[in-house]
Image (cartoon, rainbow, N blue to C red):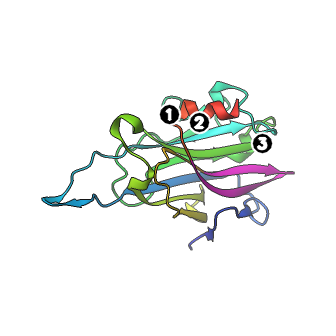
């Protein structure tokens, strides 16, 4: 069964009506756009290495501990509630390119949001941006049975942007919701993006 397709700015309940939902997988996927065709055929372009990361933020949207930035150099939060699946270097192939596992019931009480972002590795040196990516999406699945709950296709034109703020899981009372954000940003490295939340 396919999940609910969201549009930018839409928010949806995850746990309300999904009794027992506590472990979710946030999947991110993308494909390299077709290379431009020049006089001598298609130009070969370098692989675009997109890196998914999760920022565990406080109620006022702050990253209070550097260990709460989960990415390819720090694959697990200290509490074990957010775990990164590892780095996919090319975006080739079907299915999710990177996944982040989230145990909602294990998230510490002082964390109110899990913000999911994607950066292009070495974007400046490689002269790459999200205009070179197509079919990007973020989706949330129930870890039990891998059932897709929601999907948000990042279909805007992100030319010139080196980072994407995809979406966030956030607390609403005792429940968890998901917000589809889909904002482009200028941040050559995840550390630069994280500085916004300090």
Residue 58: in sight, yes or no? yes
Q: Nearer the viewer, mark 1 or mark 3?
A: 1
The mark that comes first in sequence, 3 or 2, is: 3
For label 2, the SS is: helix
2 and 1 marks in contact (CB < 8 Å) = yes
Residue 81: in sight, yes or no? no
User: Is 157 a magenta residue?
Assistant: no
The mark that comes first in sequence, 1 or 3, is: 3
Counting every numbered tag in the picture gives: 3
Picture quadrant of residue 63: top right
Please name the residue shown 59% across and 59% down the image: 141
Label placed on residue 193: 2
* Residue holding disc 3: 112
Q: Position of residue 197 (x, y in %)?
A: 69, 34
Q: Please indicate whether residue 192 sits to the left or right of residue 125 in the image.
A: right
Q: Position of residue 102 (x, y in %)?
A: 63, 46
3 and 2 marks in contact (CB < 8 Å) = no
Q: Please indicate whether residue 33 sits to the left or right of residue 39 in the image.
A: right
Badge 1: few (under 14), some or many (20 or more) residues near its Cα, within 10 Å? some
* Residue holding disc 1: 189
Q: Nearer the viewer, mark 3 or mark 2?
A: 2
């Amino acid at each position: 069964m396919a999940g609910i397709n969201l549009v930018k700015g839409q928010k949806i309940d995850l746990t309300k009506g999904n009794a027992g939902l506590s472990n979710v997988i946030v999947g991110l996927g993308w494909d390299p756009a077709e290379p431009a065709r020049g006089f001598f055929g298609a130009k070969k372009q370098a692989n675009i290495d997109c890196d998914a990361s999760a920022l565990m933020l406080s109620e006022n949207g702050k990253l209070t501990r550097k260990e709460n930035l989960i990415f390819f150099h720090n694959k697990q939060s200290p509490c074990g509630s957010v775990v990164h699946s590892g780095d996919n270097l090319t975006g080739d192939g079907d299915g999710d390119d990177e996944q982040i596992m989230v145990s909602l019931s294990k998230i510490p009480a002082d964390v109110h949001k899990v913000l999911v972002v994607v950066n292009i590795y070495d974007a400046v040196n490689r002269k790459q941006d999200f205009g070179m990516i197509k079919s990007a999406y973020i989706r949330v699945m129930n870890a039990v049975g891998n059932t897709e709950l929601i999907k948000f296709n990042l279909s805007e034109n992100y030319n010139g942007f080196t980072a994407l703020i995809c979406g966030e899981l956030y607390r609403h009372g005792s429940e968890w919701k998901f917000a589809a954000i889909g904002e482009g940003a200028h941040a050559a490295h995840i550390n630069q993006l994280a500085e916004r939340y300090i």
